[in-house]
Image (cartoon, grey):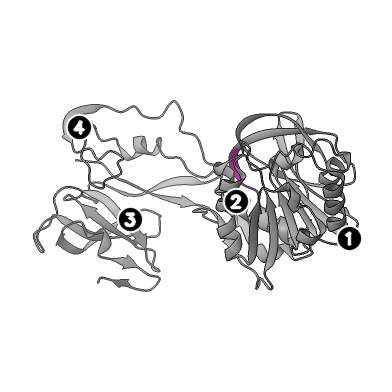
Amino acid sequence: MIRTLFALFCSAAIFAGHCSTSQADQGDTLDILFLGDGGHHQPALRFRELAPPMANRGIELTYTDDVNSLNVETLAHYDGLIVYANIERITPEQESALLNFVASGRGFIPIHCASYCFLNSDKYVELVGAQFQRHTTGTFRTEVVRPDHPIMQGFHAFESWDETYTHHRHNADRTVLEVRVDGEQREPWTWVRQHGKGRIFYTAWGHDSRTWGNPGFHNLIERGIRWATQGDPAIAGTYTDQPAMTEIGEDAAKFDYVEAEIVNYPANEKWGTIGKPLNQMQKPLTPAESATHVSIPVGFDLELVASEPEIGGKPICMNWDDRGRLWVCETVDYPNELQPPGEGRDRIRICEDSDGDGRADKFTVFAEKLSIPADKFTVFAEKLSIP
């Protein structure tokens, strides 16, 4: 018998994942030129990751890897310019076109490696706000240091693997919004500044898909684009990342195994591919032992709601109704033995806490003789419907 643990995470709020909520109509479409190159950061791929979510938010990106696009005529068609490239040199004419474009009131959004672009131009380094110096790599979360700034209001940072940029040649005429904390080091990470009538938004985030595919990065870039183009960053909506989780300790209960023959479905391009059977199965733990293997959001508590013998089989689907009852699909048939209608060994059970102590003490079988019933019910706020 496989022992089962149900748990309730008790806190003022539960975060199931990131939250990004639109707060206002997006207004007119923003047209942004995205300047990349053929370098190792693969800007064309990064563009293809960013363009769809931005288009859904009313921001149209146009890609080019032609540095000659930095001219007065071309730039005049755009509200802002993203640079994500390591182009070594810029001509005086291109430099002038870029500086005048920003000074006229347009937006400039240099991302990541853009802080090591146009190495022959001191004016470009000054415009960006600093220059890349070195990096290692790691997974980290930035710290918002100016939560009062319009870009940061409603933005609560995110975690990602990325290159850990360190900069030099810092321009004091800027406002740092986020820092990367590493011991005693507090590296400026995301900042803004102004040039003439124009605005600059820079972030060091953005080495590869691990960041460019992150919804938090999308939200941050949208905020930066909107602010740099004289718009309202609040249109991007609030963003809250997944919470920090507790670690499973070395003192977690140890597993014992028994010999078994378990069907193995390895990852494969063809659905349903069966691999060599697994020959071991974990023996059941007690609910208390199982709890030592559960990772929960930091600051939350884990409490037992129900377990065997009141629950039978494997719980493959569960949900709560508006009366605080837990509806559970219990299965024996899954995943290998779909039975004819009315001959299954699975059931739907209602678990109820009748005395308010947080533990289920009343168990009612709602339906039985089902087979793999996970798709047979959906719990809504006020009713259960079975198609």
Q: Which residue is mark 1?
A: 197
Query: To which residue does mark 4 refer?
Result: 276
Amino acid marked by disc 3: Ala
Among the two numbered marks 3 and 1 on one chain, the one whose residue lies closer to the N terminus = 1
Residues at marks 3 and 4, CA–CA distance in whole angstroms = 40 Å
Q: Amino acid at mark 4?
A: Lys
The answer to whether 296 appears left or right of 268 in the picture is: right
The residue carrying mark 3 is 360
Could you tell me which residue is drawn at 11 percent across and 63 percent down? 341
Residue 119 numbered tag: none
Q: Is residue 377 above or below residue 262?
A: below
Give whichever of 382, 371 is nearer the camera: 371
- x and y, in percent, of residue 356 in the image: 40, 59
Mark toward the start of the polypeptide (2 vs 3): 2
Instruction: Tell me the quarter of the picture where residue 294 sits.
Output: top left
**Residue range corresponding to the magenta coloring:** 154-161
What's under tag 2, amino acid-wise? Answer: Phe
